[in-house]
Structures are given as structure tokens and as C-alpha cells.
Image (cartoon, rainbow, N blue to C red):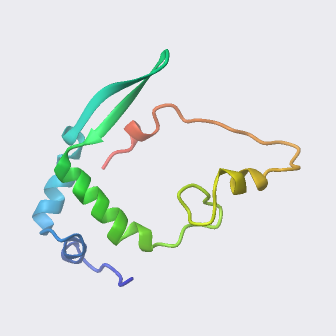
Amino acid sequence: MSTIQSESDLALRLGLSWPEVNEQARTAASRYHVYPLLMGQKKRWIEAPDAELKILQRRLLDRLLYELAPTPWAHGFTKGKSIVSNAAEHCGRQWVVSLDIKDFFPSVSR
């Protein structure tokens, strides 16, 4: 993967102009459709990007992020690893702590 040297390089890799990329990033928060998904008695909120933002996100994933090597500790969405390989790392340990950060992703900004 070639190094991205500038905003123009990034835009070129994404097949857009820099003003288009910047505008989508600037308006991203308002480009999500929020709706509930009922799972039995539980309600889970889905935040789905509009079609244009979804295309940009897919390009970021395919053209940039998939080219990066994950950390050796990553198991999710990593080829050859799974929830089983993650659990195996913890077998035999005296302590295992599991936690969930409530509303983590909505707190992540641009």
C-alpha cells in the first residue's frame, strides 16, 4: 500500500474529490437513519448511513483499512481468527474480565 501524503491522495484513493470527502465527513452525523430493531423484549437502536455515506465507508474499508495489518491481539474480523481463538488466549487464566462500554460508538466523533 502506498502512503497517503495529502488530502488529495486520500480523495484519489476513494475515487472522490477532497471537497466531496470533506463534505461527507462534515455532515456525517446528520446522514444516519436511526430506527429501533426489536429483538424479543429488547430494543436495539440501528444507526444506518445514507447510501452516499455507506459507499464512502465501504471504499475506506476496501481501499485502505483492509490493507493494514491488524494487531496480533485482534480476533474479530481477522482472517484465521475467531471468537474461539480469542477465548483460547484466556483458557487457564486465574482472572478474565469482560466489559461492555455503554453507547461507545455514538460517542465517537468525526
Task: State whether residue 40 is above or below residue 48.
Answer: above
Tell me what residue is drawn at x 74 percent, y 50 percent.
87
- Report the label total: 0
Query: For the view shown, which residue lies furthest in the front direction?
Result: 40
* Corner quadrant of residue 7: bottom left
Q: Quadrant of residue 65?
A: bottom left
* Residue 1 horizontal/vertical position (percent): 39, 82
28 or 78, nearer to the observer: 78
Say if 38 sits above or below 96 in the image.
Answer: above
Q: Where is residue 43 in the image (x, y as percent from the top left)?
A: 43, 21
Residue 94 point in image, percent of width and height: 88, 44
Vertical order, 46 against 85 (above or below) = above
Q: Nearer the viewer, residue 63 or 2?
A: 63
Residue at 52 percent of width and 72 percent of height:
69
Image position of 99 (left or right of 52): right
78 sits to left or right of 99: left
Residue 102 left/right relative to 48: right
What residue lies at 38% left-to-right and 37% top-to-bottom? 106
Q: In this view, does 53 lie to the left or right of 4?
A: left
Of 53 and 18, nearer the camera is 53
Q: Position of residue 90 (x, y in %)?
A: 79, 51
Residue that sits furthest to the bottom in the current view: 2
Q: Which residue is drawn at 55% across and 67% down?
A: 70
Instruction: Work out which residue is located at the far top of the displayed protein and give it.
Output: 41
